[in-house]
Amino acid sequence: MNFTTAVQTCLKKYVDFSGRASRSEYWYFALAYFIVMIVTGMISEMLSSILALGVLLPSLAVATRRLHDIGKSGWWQLIALTGIGIFLLLYWYVQPSSPESNEYGAAAGAPPDAAALPPGAV
């Protein structure tokens, strides 16, 4: 997934807390968020605050989908409230995607489930 596709996907799925997000999708979105916050912070602190509030849901959603990708519940984000939990989340966010399907969906790029295909489809 490239930079623009990742950002577009995250903004389109801004309240979609189900499914999975690849490592590249998460980190490209985080990079875009960081760059935009730096630029808007230089322009206006008020604009930066409004933008941060506006991107709160997409950020939480992509982080939840990223945790789903490694087989963890999105509720694990609450561990960041402890302070030290941020480091655990960072460790999980850099982990490679789980190659097999899990309770949150199929792995990205995985072939579709044969049982879900109509008869005669390959």
Image (tube, rainbow, N blue to C red):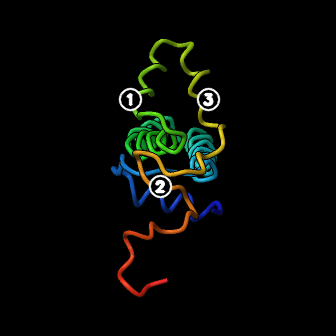
Query: Alpha-carbon distance for marks 3 and 2?
Result: 19 Å
Name the mark nearer the viewer: 3 or 2. Answer: 3
| Residue nearest the viewer, comparing 21 with 62 | 21
Name the mark nearer the viewer: 2 or 1. Answer: 1
* Amino acid, disc 3: Leu
Say the numbered circle drawn on residue 90.
3
Name the residue rendered at 59%, 22% in the picture: 88
* Amino acid, disc 2: Cys
Name the residue rendered at 40%, 61% in the picture: 12
Could you say where residue 45 lies in the image, as x and y percent from the top left? 50, 35
Q: Callout 1 environment at 10 Å: few (<14), some (14 to 19), or many (20+)?
A: few
Q: Callout 2 environment at 10 Å: few (<14), some (14 to 19), or many (20+)?
A: many
Name the residue rendered at 43%, 53% in the picture: 105
Dot 2 or dot 1: first in sequence order is 2
| Residue nearest the viewer, comparing 14 with 106 | 106
Asked whether residue 84 appears in the rendered view, the answer is yes
Dot 3 or dot 2: first in sequence order is 2
Tell me if residue 84 comes above or below residue 120 in the rendering: above
Instruction: Give the labeled residue for mark 1.
Output: 75
> Secondary structure beneath disc 3?
helix
Pointers 1 and 3 in contact (C-beta within 8 Å): no
| Residue nearest the viewer, comparing 2 with 110 | 110
> Secondary structure beneath disc 1?
helix
Dot 1 or dot 3: first in sequence order is 1
Q: Callout 3 environment at 10 Å: few (<14), some (14 to 19), or many (20+)?
A: few
Instruction: Give the labeled residue for mark 2.
Output: 10
Could you say where residue 10 lies in the image, as x and y percent from the top left? 47, 55
* Amino acid, disc 1: Trp
Name the residue rendered at 53%, 13% in the picture: 83
Image-based side of 96 in relation to 47, left or right: right
